[in-house]
Amino acid sequence: MLRALAVAGAAVSLLGSTGFTWSMTPPPDRIVIDVATVNGSGCPAGTAAVAVSPDNTAFTVTYSNYLAQVGLGAKRTDFRKNCQLDLNVHVPQGFTYAIASADYRGFAHLEPGATGTEKANYYFQGDPQTSSLSHQFNGGLDNNWQATDSVDVASLVFAPCGEERNFNINTELRVSAGTSDPTRTTSFMTMDSTDGNINTTYHLAWKQCP
């Protein structure tokens, strides 16, 4: 389902890097994100939503059914869940953008000996340059978890100036029983919670095109 989201600009506090012409503020005109597709075992139809922050510096993905698990009550394929976001980000003429950081949150119950992993890949359509980051959590754990992907300013991958290329984000949750006993216990990791949805926030960096 195609979803368009538009907002107005304000201030951002990201500093510049040698070789780039940086804007200290996001574009003054509106930003529009068209969600081309949202699919995957971790985000079935109707269970993920995308919204843009009022200041143009971030967008948020909300999940309601993102769960990976092993052990009692789990199917053989439940140990890994993923969600692929295919986004078309429209920015005003003269600007381009990159993902500077991403915040992931959820809940994990990992038996002693079990492990859980959150992984994300970021890339622009048709661009061989990709960024992949992962975070591992060890059992025993029965608590909320949080992970942040941060990209060094010099390593930011910007959308090509003057071109519209879809931006893709592929996230993954994976749980391994490890040395725990999956015939007697269950380990799981979610990107949601029992008292409400968990948000994943992607922070944008801006650059003025030549």
Image (cartoon, helix red, strand yellow):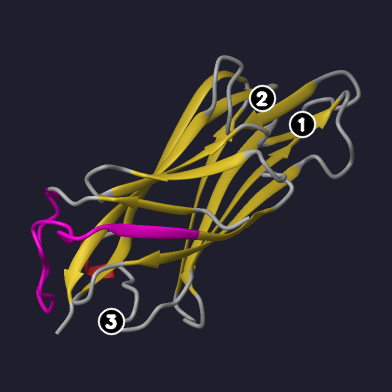
Name the one closer to the observer, 12 or 133: 12
Residue drawn 18% across the image and 77% down it: 94
- Tell me the number on the disc at residue 200: none
Determine whether, in the image, residue 84 is placed left or right of residue 14: right
Locate the N terminus and report the quarter of the image it occupies. Answer: bottom right
Place residue 27 in its image quadrant. bottom left
Is label 1 in a helix, a strand or a loop?
loop
In percent of width and height, residue 153 lies at 22, 63
Do labels 3 and 2 touch, CB within 8 Å? no
Disc 3 on helix, strand or loop?
loop
Tell me which label, 1 or 3, sits earlier in the chain: 3
Magenta stretch, main secondary structure class: loop
Q: Do callouts 1 and 3 mark residues in contact (Cβ within 8 Å)?
A: no
Closer to us: 115 or 32: 32
161 is within the stretch colored magenta:
no
The quarter of the rendered structure image containing the C terminus is bottom left
Name which residue type carries label 2.
Leu
Q: Which residues are magenta?
A: 11-34
Occupied quadrant, residue 90: bottom left
Q: Amino acid at mark 3?
A: Cys
Amino acid type of the residue tagged 1 in the rendering = Thr
Q: Residue at x 77, y 41 (%)?
A: 79
Residue 138 placement (x, y as % from top left)? 59, 31
- Mark sitting earlier along the chain (1/2): 2
Name the residue beneath numbered marker 1.
179
Say if residue 66 shows up in the picture. yes
Separation of disc 1 and disc 3 at Cα? 50 Å
Query: Disc 3 and disc 2: Cα gap in Å?
Result: 44 Å
Residue bearing mark 3: 161
Q: CA distance from mark 1 to mark 2?
A: 11 Å
Residue ID for mark 2: 110
